[in-house]
Amino acid sequence: MGVNHPKSISLFNPTYHRVVPLCDIIFIYQKAGFFDANVEAHLFLSELLIKLGGEANQAEAKKYLEKAAQSADSYYKNGATRLLAEIEK
């Protein structure tokens, strides 16, 4: 007994479950409106980009880390500084 799934479904349709590519999730998150003010998200995304590797990913990570390094919160500031040092090795 097979299940008929539509060829394209809404990402937010709770009736269906599907695997969504990571790049799509990141794009949606960035466009949601609260990414720019979320320093923790910058660190998380930067770590992911560094692990993915490649010059373009590292350049994007560096941009987010430089912004996070300006944080008033020392936890995030130290984390960003540590990751920036890791990129520059």
Image (cartoon, rainbow, N blue to C red):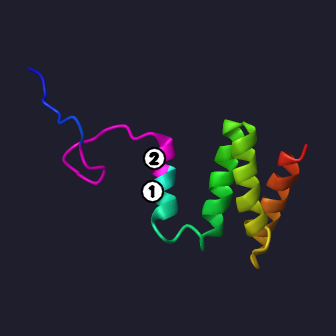
Asked where in the image residue 43 lies, by quadrant, the reply is bottom right
Outermost residue to the top: 1
Q: Nearer the viewer, residue 74 or 58?
A: 58
State which region is magenta.
9-25
Q: Which amino acid does label 1 sit on?
A: Ile
Q: Position of residue 18 (x, y in %)?
A: 31, 38
Image quarter hosting the N terminus = top left
Indicate yes or no whether the magenta region holds residue 15.
Answer: yes
In the displayed structure, does residue 71 sit left or right of residue 30?
right
Asked where in the image residue 20 lies, by quadrant, the reply is top left
Compared to 8, does 80 lie above or below?
A: below
Q: Where is residue 72 in the image (x, y as percent from the top left)?
A: 76, 79
Q: Residue at x 13, y 28 (%)?
A: 3
In the displayed structure, does residue 43 sit left or right of residue 29?
right
Q: Which amino acid does label 2 sit on?
A: Asp
Image quarter hosting the C terminus = top right
In the displayed structure, does residue 42 sit left or right of residue 16?
right
**Residue, disc 1:** 28
Q: Which residue is drawn at 24% across and 44% down?
A: 9
Compared to 28, does 3 lie above or below?
A: above
Disc 2, disc 1: CB below 8 Å?
yes
Q: Where is residue 42 in the image (x, y as percent from the top left)?
A: 65, 61
Q: Nearer the viewer, residue 80 or 88?
A: 88
Asked where in the image residue 82 lies, by quadrant, the reply is bottom right
Q: Which residue is drawn at 48% across and 71% down?
A: 33
**Residue, disc 2:** 24
From the image, give the main secondary structure of the stretch colored magenta.
Answer: loop
Compared to 1, does 47 lie above or below?
A: below
Residue 39: assigned label? none
Q: What crowding class fits label 2: few (fewer than 14 Cα within 10 Å), some (14-19), or many (20 or more)?
A: few
Q: Which residue is drawn at 69% across and 39% down?
A: 51
